[in-house]
Image (cartoon, grey):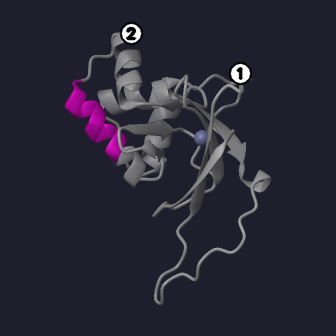
Amino acid sequence: MAELELTLDILEILSYNCLMNPDSPFLREDAVKLLHRHGIGPTRQRIDIAHILFSEHQHLSADQIQARIDAHHAYASKATVYNTLKLFVEKGLLREVLVDPTKVFYDSNVGAHHHFYDVASGKLMDIPADEITISNLPKIPPGMVSAGIDVVVRIRSAV
Ligand SMILES: [Zn+2]
């Protein structure tokens, strides 16, 4: 049984720039270019974090990102990782997906899309934006506009 939860988020959906091309690996110099394009000063740690995050399309928690950084011997403190992720989100490089108040994922796909969330494994999977149709949305309060809609469909094994 899937439970549908509709979250109206103050999310600026930016067009997804296709970073994940299997034919051309995402190099450190690509990470530097990406940071420049988004007006972010390329410090060594920002480059390390961008290189790890954007080498493939993935959904990672801050702890998982920290573990990958440690595994790559690219030392960065917890505070640095946190601040860098916050900056990447602000600059539109990363999208935050809030599954519940204790679970935040960082999504390297900033294009419009929705998610399946496996409550048993804690895994997040993409649902293309056009596979969900939303109707009967409440009227947006005067003076406000929609900044994006994202849906989390919670799933678990049927057996
Ligand atoms: Zn996603």
Q: Nearer the viewer, residue 78 or 15?
A: 78
Q: Is mark 2 within 8 Å of ligand 1?
A: no
Q: Position of residue 7 (x, y in %)?
A: 53, 58
Q: Which residues are magenta?
A: 77-86
Point 45% across, 51% down: residue: 38
Q: Position of residue 41 (x, y in %)?
A: 33, 43
Quadrant containing the C terminus in the rendered view? top right
Residue 17 visible in the displayed image: no
Q: Residue beneath label 1, please?
A: 159
Q: Residue beneath label 2, please?
A: 71
Would residue 79 be counted in the magenta stretch? yes
Q: CA distance from mark 1 to mark 2?
A: 36 Å
Q: Identify residue type, mark 1.
A: Val
Q: Nearer the viewer, residue 116 or 37?
A: 116
Q: Position of residue 141 (x, y in %)?
A: 48, 85
Q: Position of residue 29 (x, y in %)?
A: 49, 29
Q: Nearer the viewer, residue 8 or 33?
A: 8
Relative side of 71 to 3, left or right: left
Q: Identify residue type, mark 2.
A: Ala
Tell me which image quadrant ligand 1 sits in. Answer: top right
Residue 27 visible in the displayed image: yes
Residue 125, quarter of the rendered image? top right
